[in-house]
Image (cartoon, coloured by chain):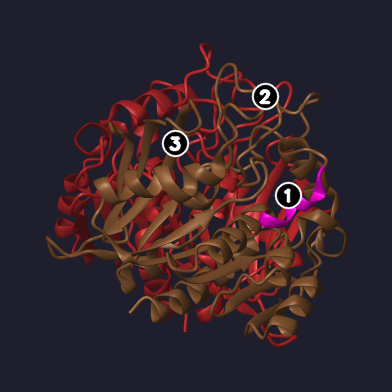
Chain colours: A brown, B red
Amino acid sequence: MMLETVAQNRSFGGTQGVYRHASETTGTEMTFSVFVPDHRKGTGLPVVWYLSGLTCTHANVTEKGEYRRACAELGLIFVAPDTSPRGEGVPDDRVGAYDFGLGAGFYVDATEAPFSANYRMWSYLTRELPEVVLGHFPVNPERQSIMGHSMGGHGALTIALSNSETYRSVSAFSPIVAPSRVPWGRKALAGYLGDDETVWRAHDAVALIEDGARVAEILVDQGDADQFLTEQLRPSLLAEACANARIPLSLRLQPGYDHSYYFISTFMADHLHWHSRRLL
Amino acid sequence: MMLETVAQNRSFGGTQGVYRHASETTGTEMTFSVFVPDHRKGTGLPVVWYLSGLTCTHANVTEKGEYRRACAELGLIFVAPDTSPRGEGVPDDRVGAYDFGLGAGFYVDATEAPFSANYRMWSYLTRELPEVVLGHFPVNPERQSIMGHSMGGHGALTIALSNSETYRSVSAFSPIVAPSRVPWGRKALAGYLGDDETVWRAHDAVALIEDGARVAEILVDQGDADQFLTEQLRPSLLAEACANARIPLSLRLQPGYDHSYYFISTFMADHLHWHSRRLL
């Protein structure tokens, strides 16, 4: 389990690193970033996993997310993985669309050819990458939380709902909550998992809740000027599912905010404080 | 004086905008960003001008500078101009080097052909852009401060030293303090201003101070792991000049920090609080 250090920069009294490793799961090299605040030797710190949205790599949130000040204050490690496998030979959307293939792994293990060989982000994020991170960084495995943006909000919600013993808390910015019922999600789930919609339910937060999956609570921030709000995101579907399942959902509609990192960075510290209180 | 709005995003309870205008000074279109925190109608807010370093546009600090939270808290407008004229017909370094020409205007009015037609960043920043900004944004012209990074630290220091009636305070991250005496500066000043080094002195902070220019005080943060520290930046030259001139200089050597925005963002809020106290 070799880990290559791509870059390390001192920032906010900690180390912002970018790392690369050969992934057995995806059959490619995978790059991710980790912020480690300064800490006492031998301590295991809580960790927040951040899953990014369509078109992103680890770099978007690392450069624009404004998470380091809060992580340094709270003593949180912050991990930002990539959104898909990449590299020569990794199949992409057939016309290179932004919403499928490279940069759009949708946090599933693909079963459809030609994607099934590499597009295994579910296993990568729930098994291989946690092992790599726990093996190389001072993380306390009992104190993990997960969050994400848009497609990454979908990833965070579905992973937390399916692994509630692993993640103490889950939050999202403008998440895709019901991919089976919106264009981005239907294209991705059909492309990666095939046409049988019953197998999609394991990768649809609303369907998972309808089918009995539970988390203690959920925090969601959503801009009301988000161009994707009504067609792709539809947070009311999550609100309805949570209400029926009695999952406490704090869904905060933020007036004037859009889908960008200008929105995410504004509420990032809020989310980190919220997770930190649940990671004590 | 037409101003085109390129983008506006709600962020940290304010508006982050990007704007474009046809500059008479440079003969090109110029793009800049402005953050305006929410405020009472009719108020004139204090403004901080931020000048960027080599290769940058307005976008680098706008995306990575992490200034909005502090500006919103303190009620500061933040303006980030470009670092050179750009566009078809604007001459560049003859081999396209990063340290001269496009992205490297060095905040002077060039007198040498072919640069003298467009490379007039001194006049642009001290005359035309302030007029544009004061005409379109709720700025109190009596409450202006200036700061910058690297080449932009050079710009901030020389502009403040030459216009101490306009700027209440000046600070810099890893500034070029004595361009006449370092490779980046010597190349730029010769290229834009010609070989007579006596005319360079008006664009060299250390020389300006030696020649009698004064500001009330200066704040500088400098990473001690900055790869440009000893050859290009040489902050000790500024320390010596300030000591001789009895200008209070707070030169903070930050252990482990480099030349990047991971460094700048760490200390940005400190600088904004420092300026804000001087803008009361």
Which secondary structure dominates the residues rendered in magenta? helix
| Chain letter for the residue marked with disc 1 in the picture | A
First to last magenta residue range:
A196-202
How many numbered marks does the figure carry? 3
The answer to whether residue B161 shows anywhere in this view is no
The 10 Å Cα crowd at callout 3, few under 14, some 14 to 19, many 20 or more, is many
Give the CA distance from mark 3 to mark 1. 29 Å
The answer to whether residue A9 shows anywhere in this view is yes
Quick check: A223 left or right of A45?
A: right
Give the CA distance from mark 2 to mark 1. 58 Å
Please tell me whether mark 3 or mark 1 is closer to you in this view: 1
Three-letter amino acid code at the position of disc 3? Thr
From this view, report whether residue B86 is shown above or below residue B226: above
Q: Secondary structure at mark 2?
A: loop
Q: Which residue is mark 3?
A: A31
Q: Are marks 2 and 1 on the same chain?
A: no
From this view, report whether residue B207 is shown above or below residue A257: above
Q: Secondary structure at mark 3?
A: strand
Three-letter amino acid code at the position of disc 2? Val
Looking at the rendering, which quadrant does residue B234 occupy?
top left
Sequence-earlier tag: 3 or 1: 3
Q: Which residue is mark 1?
A: A199
Please tell me whether mark 2 or mark 3 is closer to you in this view: 3
Q: Position of residue A96 (x, y in %)?
A: 76, 27
Check residue A199 for magenta coloring.
yes
Identify the residue at image location x=39%, y=76%: A276
Identify the residue at image location x=84%, y=55%: A182
Q: Which residue is mark 2?
A: B90
Quick check: B229 left or right of B276?
A: left
